[in-house]
Amino acid sequence: GPVLASGQVMPFVGFGTWKIPKEGAAAAVESAIRQGYRHIDCACDYGNEKEVGAGIKAAIDAGVVKREELFVTSKLWNTFHAKEHVLPAFKRTLTDLGLEYLDLYLIHFPIALKYVPFETRYPPEWIHDPAAAQPRMELADVPIRETWEAMEALLDQGLAKNIGVSNFQAQLLMDLLRTARTRPAVNQVELHPYLSQEQLVEYHAKLGIVVTGYSPLGAGSYVSLQMATGVESALDDPVIKGIAAKHSKTPAQVCLRWGIQRGYNVVPKSSTDARIRENISVFDFELSVDDMAAIAALTRCRRFNYPRGYTQFISQFYPISPLALSHRIT
């Protein structure tokens, strides 16, 4: 897998835990570890870190893996961006996961929201007060620099081995790098055949920042959220299906392999054993140059996880440009 600035190796395929129900999360995580996954991608906002932690503990207790063989990622939620809230939020995640350190801790979104105490609601989610007459997202005036300096303190204390960001586009990253003591090790962004973000991937390669691609299979997880339609699935694309048939692989495996061969790691999500196994069985074939080009040509700048789209439904307009860069880095 990609080597981080710290020298730590990040596995190419991680197990994503977004939208895995609490009741099935522990079993799914333990199954994933038994089937060879060594990177577990978590977040406060997923609402299942205690159960994910139980799955990790079960695998360790059974002798399947040692803690130091796992790479565990989690993310700081938007309501905890103020410097005084970063450490408590981190410690809550650590307690829920039952771990003594994290391999990677990310700023989940470049969106600061008004603080919600743990005892009021955890995870806080997007709406500040669901019981309000007009429930809405409440913004907080916290600059990214303040949040990043608190993230750097976690690194200084050895609580996190690496720190990074998520959902950051190039211009915001450029601004962060002007003041950061430690540059982000990772930027986790949406990447799939319909959103290839070629310039953003290229820019990170030039910086030496590792990219993680989330939602690497595209539309699937967003259909139930009404943020995508079933017909937008790359898994049904004739080009993907044709390449899959040629290699005797599934469309999902082709999408994942495409990401890996572009040089970044991917974090597919599944709750079923067969799919969990399928998603990590991507190291026994290679896509040709023509295959890679054919998949790259499918990009249509289709972003499914787009705050501009869903924040307006909670009484808050919050545009985030879908453009990575306005020009090509040379």
Image: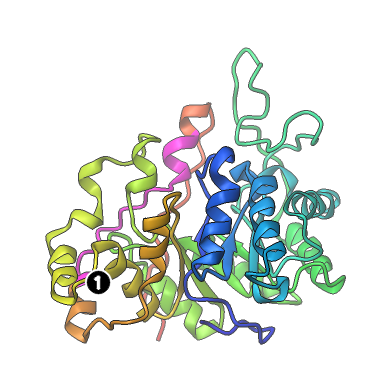
115 left or right of 284? right
What x and y, as percent, mark residue 328? 37, 78
226 or 330, nearer to the observer: 226
Q: Which residue is mark 1?
A: 296
Is residue 313 something one can see in this rendering? yes
What x and y, as percent, mark residue 42? 61, 55
What x and y, as percent, mark residue 317? 50, 35
313 left or right of 48? left
- What is the quadrant of the C terminus in the image? bottom left
Query: Does 202 lie within the magenta span?
Result: no
- Residue drawn at x 50%, y 35% is 311
What x and y, as percent, mark residue 153? 84, 67
- Residue drawn at x 81%, y 31% is 119
Query: Does 309 lie within the magenta span?
Result: yes
Crowdedness of circle 1 by 10 Å Cα count: few (<14), some, many (20+)? some
- Residue drawn at x 76%, y 68% is 160
**Element class at badge 1:** helix
What amino acid is at disc 1? Ala
Which residue in the rendered view is the most extreme toward the front? 62
178 or 50, nearer to the observer: 50
For residue 166, above or below residue 202? above
Q: Which residue range is magenta in the image?
A: 295-311
